[in-house]
Amino acid sequence: MSIIENFRNIFKIEDLRNRILYVVGVLMVYRIGAYVTMPGVDASMLTAETGDASSLMGLFDLFVGGAFSRAGVFALGIMPYITAAIIIQLMGAAVPYFQKLQREGEEGRRKINRLTRYGTVGITAVQAIGFGINLLATSPNAIVVSTPAFIFTAIVVLTAGTTFVMWLGERITDRGIGNGISILIMIGIIAALPTALINEISVTNNAIIMIVELAGLILVIASCVLLTQGTRKVPVQYAKRVVGRKVYGGTTQYLPLRVNAAGVMPIIFAQSIMFIPSTIGTFFPENETVQFLTMWSADFTGLTYSVVFFIICVFFTFFYTAIAVNPKEMADTMKRQGGFIPGVRPGKQTVEFIDNILTKITLPGSLFLSFVAILPAIIARMGVTPGFALFYGGTSLLIIVGVALDTLQQIESHLMMRHYDGFMKTGKIKGRRRM
């Protein structure tokens, strides 16, 4: 069945069609907001530079679809919400109160979501002050009001903007398709792709080289899909149970352990740490000692930067996997449901068995993920423009691939429920059940 026919099937299903159109409408509102300048700012006087794509400001601007450089009302985007969610998740591994909330089911999730929203407002207010100070330093002529009034306006407007973006993301999740927060981040990143591609074409000015670059990009995307979808299936046997006149269990199922259980989080953590030296250097521009110690972090294509970045990514992959995946909890759940791994005793031996497999698959996964993280630096050193090189790996590509696969999985589920073939009839996308 052709791709065109698959698209026609999507729009034959009224519920799925309405969900997709709702997402498109919300994304249009989000993109329009990125071009609405904050009160008290003369957009024509803004400096065009926010730093290159490898800098903290440049990366932040990429995630919010250029709203940061335009001083838009959505300048901080959804990133404060992501920061708050990461903090809450990390606290869940160390603070008993949050561990208790995670075990309370739906009620606990509601409380965690409420705390995440409160944390988002607080983080946004703090970041808004930093945004205002940065704008005053880089584009003083663009500010048409007094400094105290502008800082106050920045806090109010940017906090309201981020809260509204957070609400848009939740609306997409509830009434649209896919994870709304992730889709908003992905759209912000994709918005920079046309400009980066045009710049690369103008700089290269060679059709053969462009074809090679695009073919390499497709190959990298395919590799990231394999990394995202890769799992190690552990067989689990469930004993037979007789409940009344019915017999339950007696079947073999599989416990899927992801090769990259940490997702994109190790790269985000590592990138945040890599920005610290250069950020310190900006506070002491006249101190030669500080500048000497931090100059290695100024060039993301440098060998020292890439090596340190690679090592930190490997470390955080193991660290975050240890937080996100709990072998003891898996073993306890399996034991309560009457399941066991063939040849392994329930309890402590099962925990050690799962932990051993998790360590073995995380090692190659962490190495490949770290290679993807430094791949943009390698591509940039080969002559590709930095803006276009970012789409060859790193946070940008992994977010796009992960969100696209998750959204496609949900569309597949809707199509299969109505007995339509999906986009990957012969593929192995998760969520499709073979008949």
Image (cartoon, grey):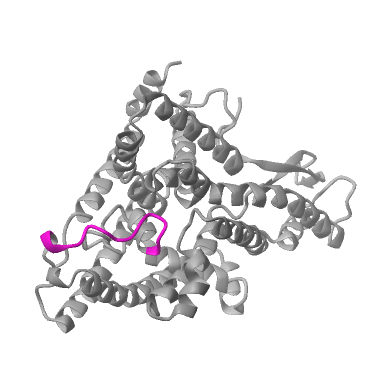
Closer-to-camera residue (10/272): 272
The secondary structure that dominates the magenta segment is loop
Closer-to-camera residue (286/404): 286
* Residue projecting furthest to the top: 1
Residue 304 spot, x, y in % from top left = 58, 60
Q: Is residue 110 visible?
A: no
Q: Quadrant of residue 312?
A: bottom right
Looking at the rendering, in which quadrant would you find the C terminus? Answer: top right
Residue 314 spot, x, y in % from top left = 65, 57
Q: Residue at x 48, y 52 (%)?
A: 395
User: Is residue 63 within the magenta segment?
Assistant: no
Q: Is 4 displayed left or right of 345 in the figure?
A: left
Closer-to-camera residue (275/255): 275
Q: Quadrant of residue 331?
A: bottom right
Residue 242 versus residue 156 in the image, above or below? above
Q: Quadrant of residue 152?
A: bottom left
Residue 128 versus residue 199 in the image, above or below? below
User: Is residue 55 within the magenta segment?
Assistant: yes
Magenta range: 44-56
Residue 348 versus residue 424 in the image, above or below? below
Q: Residue at x 86, y 45 (%)?
A: 342
Total marks in image: 0
Residue 303 spot, x, y in % from top left = 57, 55
